[in-house]
Amino acid sequence: MSGIHVSTTINGDQIDYVCEPEETMLDVLRDRLGMTGAKEGCSTGDCGACSITVDGRLTCSCLMLGAEAGGHEIGTVEGVAQGNELHPVQQKILDHAALQCGVCTPGIVVAAKALLEKNPDPTETEVRYWLAGNLCRCTGYDKIIRAVMDAAQELRSA
Amino acid sequence: MAGNQEFDADRAQDFRVVGTRPARPDGMDKVTGKARFGADMNMPGQLIGKILRSPHPHARIKSIDASEALAMPGVKAVVTAEDFNADAKDRDVLTNIMARDKALYEGHAVAAVAATSRIKAQQALKRIKVNYEILPHVTDVDAAMQPDAPILHDDMFTQGLDEKPAKPSNINARHEFGHGDVEKGFAQADIVIERDFKTAATHQGYIEPHACVANVGADGMSELWVCTQGHFHVRSQCASLLGMDVSRLRVTASEIGGGFGGKTTVFIEPVALALSRKAGRPVKLVMTREEVFKASGPTASSSMRVKIGVKKDGTITAGEASLNYQGGAFPGAPADFGAMSAFACYDLENVKAVAFDVVTNRPKGAAYRAPGAPMSVFAVESVVDELAKEIGMDPFDLRLKNAARDGSKSSYGPKFGKIGLVACLEAAKAHPHYAAPLGPNQGRGVASGFWFNFGGETCSNLNVNEDGTITLAVGTPDIGGSRASMCIMVAEELEVPYERVRAIVADTSALGFNDTTEGSRVTFSSGMALIKAARKAKEEMCKRAAMMWDIPAEAVYWAEGAAHPSGPNAGDFEPMTIEEIAGSAAKTGGPIAGHHEYNADGAGVSFGTHIVDTEVDPETGYVKILRYTVVQDAGKAIHPDYVEGQFQGGAVQGIGWALNEEYIYGEDGRLQNATFLDYRLPVASDLPMIDTVIVEVPNPGHPYGVRGVGETGIVPPLAALANSVSAAAGVRLTDLPMSPPKVLKAIGATKLAAE
């Protein structure tokens, strides 16, 4: 088996890796690069726990091949906080206790940040539909929605 | 269950930390992606394990030939049933983790491979030849109880009958609970309603699939990293299944991505250990989502009949339930819990609940949040709703008139202690939600629910560090923020800031045995253990201060995080802070610690009442949830955010059960919807905000009054939704889930009948 050499940018860092043709971007992140923030909940694009951004666009990394990342800008949960400074979405999730087990949280963080970059003033319904691709089994979404709305407000007033 | 009188009402008057909402200690790692869950661990030199599963729902395994697989490059080990301890304590678990003579459900493990990569392991699975003799199967609970049904276990003779049956059957056991004379009670009733109900099997639906990494050394020294609700239980089961000493196996609980009861037993863990033992290298094993659906432990499906009689004044004269639960291919459907819970919300003179635990060719069930209760309570609360309408009484008034109260004889035997059902019903009735207007095609439903709660074996440690900060070690995996609650309770007890306390979940080598995180027990049991540990540490610190002051220990008391002389007679000393005492510990006797180990009693039962408004689209049968309110007794909310979170999460799981979720089996006995696309968990856009009201009726069995809150929240929603949808649709719905086709069919049938 000969691997495919990929040159890409992840969270602003130039990264090179070799992967097999059948490996997903999620496999590459988790198994080759040790970036385990994105989680595999389903591998069918239904749960959103593996959410990343590709050139700013929200994507399930389990539905993308590792070989496809070449030349693109990949964003993962590991790149959301700037050093020790949390993104408002992260801070508000903590403030609102908008997590229980926390396994969906990385995907929610990535997805919510992508929403607010696209739509800084979403309605509750818009937040709910945007996050409909991110399953959370613990919280019933209530506190998550409140946290994202609150983060949106803070970002607008910043 | 009585338990000790632990609650201190005076103490509860001036909580300073309890009831606040600080950030959880594991939060930062979880929002940044650093937290390590089951599949986030790798060990040096690890292999990847994969499991070969039966494609047949019922088949005799005539032979397994793995020689071709073993000959493949990169394949290091294959295990089958022969690689496990045939004398293991729990024979059902032994047979479930790896099929022995028969595959009993689609997805039943038959063999497993460890190879140098996932792809190689997957390829190797295809080269293992299993010769099956296909047998007839049964997946429906009622069909499985028929005399001519295919029999799963030749040695299953129904338990709980007066006489042992002559022939084996799929009915493992009959359970009966109740008191009085139901026939007499029905004769006294003005109105008797009897209905049949069905609920589908549902899955806990945790987002994190089962995952573990096992390492067995040549000397037998072994370690296991695993996402589990109970690592001590995993240790004990795995040691037995592998035939090894408990002391040889050290189990570390990873962060856990949801469990809800589904991670209280073992599936892949013993397999990973067996592969590692055979290969001599660490083995990582992670389930796919399809495997989670087909081969972990969903909850029971049910078929039920409930009959309740009521007088025109609203007195319930008798209640009777007959419950058939199938729990998959092995005994253990929570039929007994269903029967015990069915009428628990009522103080009845005549009550009887009979339940059957039935096996079918489906995966072996596991616990799911208040196991067994949501189904039977759905049936009972639906009939109660209908009776209220029949006699023209407000559904809350009917419930209040017959509600279980302090000292009531429960429908399952013991007398209730101090309970909060009436408080919940009254709070719900008074809630603005209940008075809000409804529009066309809209309906409102209410229902109550109950759960026992559990105490259990618990061992917790508290260490006062050399700088006066506190480290806690608990043996109960934190599944929803419990570490924060532990820190709060200890901060309260020692009167130190929350930030000075840190709680960790210790591995199995660091503490004595702890029961699993289940039964809504952690904040109650581990919390009480830590309060007692903190009291011991306080006493010790007072002693150390006394030693340094050279006064009797009795003349020292603890307040504001410091030792104080009890009065001028004791001596004129400035208070000695925890930092000072800890800093001089070396001179006064060494490290300061507290610990407590016990089998916790007095968990205190829990009740809740839900209100839900829905709108039914008469064209499509689609149900939209307009408003939802949860009222539940928490005893005392230690960290209210996470109490609300339990209420909300439980309610939404119940909503999924009521409206969307079901295991769908084909004629071929195979699961038709083993993906999150086809097995539909509620998503954010399906739901409104879930309002919560925390009722606090202190549990006498806990120093701060805590009752478990984790499970009760899933009990009322099935009936609340059924009552709401039935009101909106104008027809009684008795079959869950109330998916659009079913609702539409029910509406159509009434229309047809009207024409």
Image (cartoon, coloured by chain):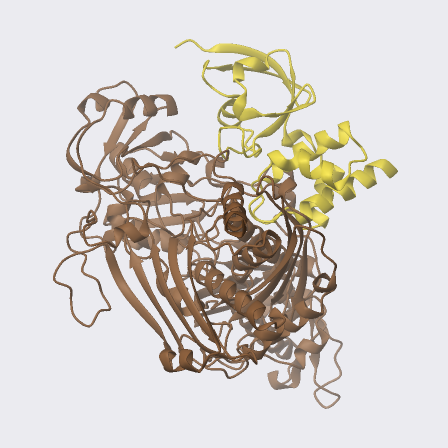
Chain colours: A yellow, B brown
Q: Position of residue B313 (x, y in %)?
A: 57, 81
In this rendering, the answer to whether A96 lies above or below B602 is above
For the point 81% across and 35% down, the residue is A121
Task: Kindly indicate the quadrant of the structure image that contains residue A145.
Answer: top right
Q: Position of residue B382 (x, y in %)?
A: 51, 62
Viewport quadrant of the N terminus of chain B: bottom left
For the point 21% across and 62% down, the residue is B158
Q: Position of residue B311 (x, y in %)?
A: 51, 79
Task: Pick the residue in front: A97 or B466.
Answer: A97
Q: Is residue B152 visible?
A: yes
In the image: residue B323, left or right of residue B415 = left
Q: Position of residue B578 (x, y in %)?
A: 67, 67
Task: Kindly indicate the quadrant of the structure image that contains residue A82.
Answer: top right
For the point 66% across and 32% down, the residue is A110
Outermost residue, right side? A157
In this rendering, the answer to whether B485 lies above or below B107 is below
Task: Pick the residue in front: B443 or B162.
Answer: B443
